[in-house]
Image (cartoon, rainbow, N blue to C red):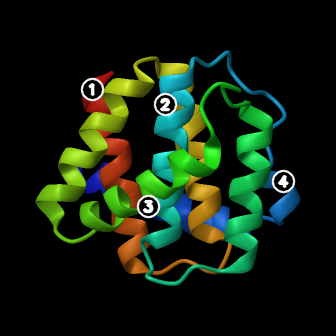
Amino acid sequence: MLETVESQTSQALVLIDQTPQNALISTLVPTLVQTQREAIVDLLLLGMYADRHISVIEQDVLAEEVEKIGWDEFYSFSLYFQRAVPRVRDAIASPARTTQFLLAISQQLDQVDVMKFAIEKFSAMLCLDGSNDAEAQLLDQVMETFFAAA
């Protein structure tokens, strides 16, 4: 069963990679609380750092997504970003840390519709500068973790 899920999600990443960028932009943003916004940003940063290459387009898309999902005006996004990047770098250092990081994110998202939204944005982020096997495996891991928690 797990092989089937992995195969399907890897195939989904290939299909997403072949989709024009504009088609990946969702207009439906679920109602989010700040902890969910932070979890989505953490997940997007994980997608950016997954291939160890940060592109300008990834940075631009992150900024656009933060604008779309909103941000609590009492908590500076730039301050959050400065604290989140080291956490993401630490998370990609080992598979065990990645798993712990994803579990924490899934707990913050805590609603299936928000998880689906986050996965959509995450998979789109992975494809911005092309995808590779490691990114496909990471998408599989995200889906497994989130839907095991749901």
Residue with the mark numbered 4: 23
Q: Quadrant of the C terminus?
A: top left
Tag in front: 2 or 4: 2
Q: Position of residue 129 (x, y in %)?
A: 65, 80
Q: Earlier in the sequence, mark 1 or mark 4?
A: 4
Horizontal arrangement in the rendering, residue 139 relative to residue 67 (left or right):
left
* Mark 3: amino acid: Val
Disc number placed over residue 3 in the picture, else none: none
Looking at this view, is 143 or 46 the one in front? 46
Q: CA distance from mark 3 to mark 4?
A: 28 Å
Label 2: how many Cα within 10 Å (few below 14, some 14–19, many 20+): many
Q: Earlier in the sequence, mark 3 or mark 4?
A: 4
**Are dots 2 and 1 in contact, CB under 8 Å?**
yes
Cα–Cα span, label 1 and label 4? 28 Å
Q: Is residue 20 visible?
A: yes
The relative height of residue 135 versus residue 64 in the rendered view (above or below) is below
Q: Which residue is mark 1?
A: 149
Q: Which residue is mark 2?
A: 115
Marks 2 and 1, the one that precedes in the sequence: 2
Q: Of helix, strand and loop, which one carries label 2? A: helix
